[in-house]
Amino acid sequence: MIEGQDALREQLPDDFSRLLLDGGLQVLVGANPIRAHLFAAALREVVTYLLHGMAPDGEVEKASWYVEEADRPTRRQRTTFAVQGGMPDKTVSALGVDVTEMHRSMKREMAELNKRTHVKPGTLLTDVNEIESFATEVVAAVSEFLYAVSDLRESVADAVVHGASAQVFGAFLQESNDIIDLLSTHSVVEQVDVEGVRVLSIGAADIEYEAEGTVYVELNYGSGSDRAAGDGATMTDDYPFKCRMTGGVVNVNEIHHVSDMEVDTSSFYE
C-alpha cells in the first residue's frame, strides 16, 4: 500500500477520478516491469481530468489575471484557477493562503510524471524501493493540490460568514417569505444569524456560497386593534434556514445577491 493513497481517494470528487487512481494503484501490485510508468500515466490522467473539470478554457480566459501564453490555458494557469478562480493573488494573500509551494510541487511532480510516462531503454524504474518512493511522492503532490483548493475555500467562507447576516436579513425583508407569512396574521423577521457558509464554486468573476443559520421571527395573530384589545396574540420563534449567496472575487467580504431561501418551519406544527 502506498502511503497516503486512502486519503487521496477520499479527496477525489467523483467515481471516474477514483477509478483512475485505483487502476494506477493496481498496476503497482505485481511484477510488471513498467508498473511505475503505467502508474505515472494513470496519475497524470487524474491531474489532467481534475484540472480540466475545475478550470475549463473559457472560464480561465475570463479571469482578470489571465494573460495569453499559448493557444489555450497552461497547466499552471489551470492550477491557479482551480484553486482561486478569478481571485487576484493579493486577495488570496490577504486571506493568509500561500499557494507558492503548491505550484512548485505540482510543477515538479508533473515534470516527473511526464518523464516517467515516456519509457526508453535505460529509463525503466525497476527498484522496488524507488518505485514506492516515487509513487508516494506523486500521491502526496496530488493530495497537496486538493488540500490547497479546500483550504482556500474554507478561508473564503470564514471571511464571509461574519458579514453575511446583514445581507441575508435584507433579503428576508425585501422578499416576502411565503413559508413564514403562513404562520401568522402578520409575521415579522426580527433577526438573522448566519452560522455557516460553504463555498460552492469560485468562478472568474463570482463566488457562489451556500449559507445556513437561524431566523428569529415575531408571529402576530389578529389585527393591531385586536391585539391592543387583548383579543390577539404575539409570540416569538426561530427556525433554521439555508440559502445561496453570490459575491465577487476581489472583495470577498461583500455579498451581492441572496437567493433560493429555504426555511424549515416544521417545528411550528409539532
Image (cartoon, helix red, strand yellow):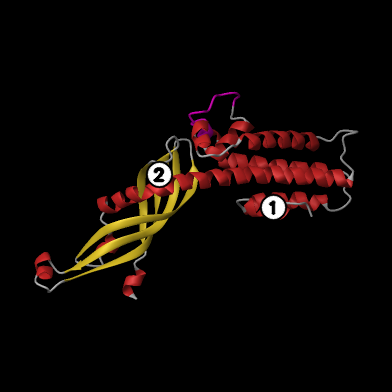
Provide the residue span drawn in magenta. Answer: 58-71
Q: Is residue 125 left or right of residue 105?
A: right
Front position in the image: 154 or 106: 154
Q: Tell me which amino acid carries mark 2.
A: Thr
Q: Is residue 137 magenta?
A: no
Front position in the image: 261 or 227: 227
Q: Position of residue 212 (x, y in %)?
A: 41, 56
Q: Position of residue 77 (x, y in %)?
A: 59, 31
Q: Going 26% across and 58% down the picture, which residue do you hit?
A: 189
Q: Going 15% across and 69% down the picture, which residue do you hit?
A: 222
Instruction: Give the vertical position of 155 relative to 71 (above or below).
Output: below
Q: Position of residue 194 (x, y in %)?
A: 39, 54
Q: Which residue is mark 1?
A: 19
Instruction: Give the vertical position of 188 relative to 231 (above or below).
Output: above
The residue carrying pointer 1 sits among few (fewer than 14), some (14 to 19) or many (20 or more) residues within 10 Å by Cα, namely some
- Which secondary structure type mostly characterizes the magenta part of the structure? loop
Q: Which residue is mark 2?
A: 246
The residue carrying pointer 2 sits among few (fewer than 14), some (14 to 19) or many (20 or more) residues within 10 Å by Cα, namely many
Q: Position of residue 24 (x, y in %)?
A: 76, 49
Q: Tell me which amino acid carries mark 1.
A: Leu
Q: Which mark lies nearer to you, 1 or 2?
A: 2
Q: Secondary structure at mark 2?
A: strand
Instruction: Give the vertical position of 58 relative to 19 (above or below).
Output: above
Q: Residue furthest bottom?
A: 270
Instruction: Please identify the quarter of the rendering in which residue 135 is found.
Output: top right
Q: Secondary structure at mark 1?
A: helix
Is any atom of residue 7 visible in this view?
Answer: yes
Q: Going 66% across and 44% down the picture, which residue do you hit?
A: 144
